[in-house]
Image (cartoon, rainbow, N blue to C red):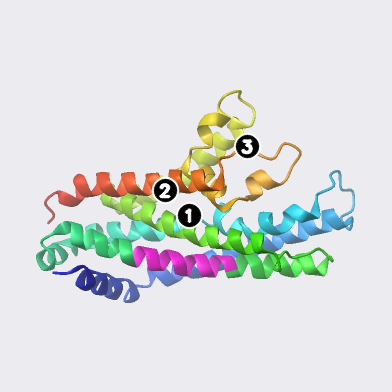
Amino acid sequence: MTLAAAVRSESVKQVTTSMWWLLAIILVVYVAFTAAALGFVFAASASGALPGQQMTIDPSILPPTIYSSATSVGYVFPLLIGTLMVTSEFRHQTLTPTFLAFPRRGTALAGKVVVGILLGLLYGVLGTLAAVGAGAGFLAGFGIDTGLGEADTWALIGRMLIAFVLWVLIGIGVGALVRNQVGAVVGVLVFTQFLEPIGRVAGSFVDGLSEVVRFLPGAAGDALVGASVFTGIGPTGGDGGTLEWWAGGIVLLAYAAVFLVVGWATTWRRDVS
């Protein structure tokens, strides 16, 4: 069977399930709330409207910092949908008919990658609209330039879309490597919500550790985008020196490639029931 057939088959699987749009709704709500909260607090502080403020924030850094919340806090959603695209097949034992239809298993995995790219773009657009819509509203309300007329802002948005796509691909690789859906999802949540954030905070205080943590997936994703709430606000700039945006993209792409290749070479090629 051809790659086009694998893409059609995978597309049907995704649109006939509810998980992709449920996660999309949660993504939009979560990112919009986060961007609105950041927009209010930071814009009020930068404009001097926040009572008892202790720190003056440069208004020019607010648009990219707030808009990038779509990726800096929302990247777990494309990562999860990518993981679920694969682990749901193991859980519901639908891989057997899939492999019967596509004896060349690499074609079936490639079909997931293509559909994953499309889902990543969709999630990226939704997350970006939520962050920019909510954040720009508060910036404008406090008389701060939204940055939407600047090329740098649109370049940042373009890199955000790339980051969303890469996160989905990493998720597909994780799902191909870890068959157990509960284990894969729990692992993703523990790493993204606890282990890496703790490591990045520790990197701000431990000499030499910042050189390591900047190569973690989330840090690389923030570097690719070029801004993050974790690095954009504060006197020290967050968790130390970050990679250049292109280097962050290469690191994130490398994570996706490694997980996909290892997953294909091991778990994906095993017998399934």
Residue type at the position of mark 1: Val
- Residue at the (54%, 30%) spot, across then down: 211
Instruction: Work out whether residue 131 or residue 41 is closer to the camera in this orientation and state it.
Output: 131
What segment carries the magenta color? 115-128
Q: Is residue 73 visible?
A: no
Q: Quadrant of the N terminus?
A: bottom left
Residue type at the position of mark 3: Asp
Q: Earlier in the sequence, mark 3 or mark 2?
A: 2
Q: Which residue is mark 3?
A: 239
Left or right relative to 51: residue 251:
left
Q: Quadrant of the C terminus?
A: bottom left
Q: Quadrant of residue 9?
A: bottom left
Tell me if residue 255 comes above or below residue 17 in the rendering: above
Residue 116 image point, x, y percent: 36, 63
**Residue 76, label in figure:** 1
Q: Which residue is mark 2?
A: 188
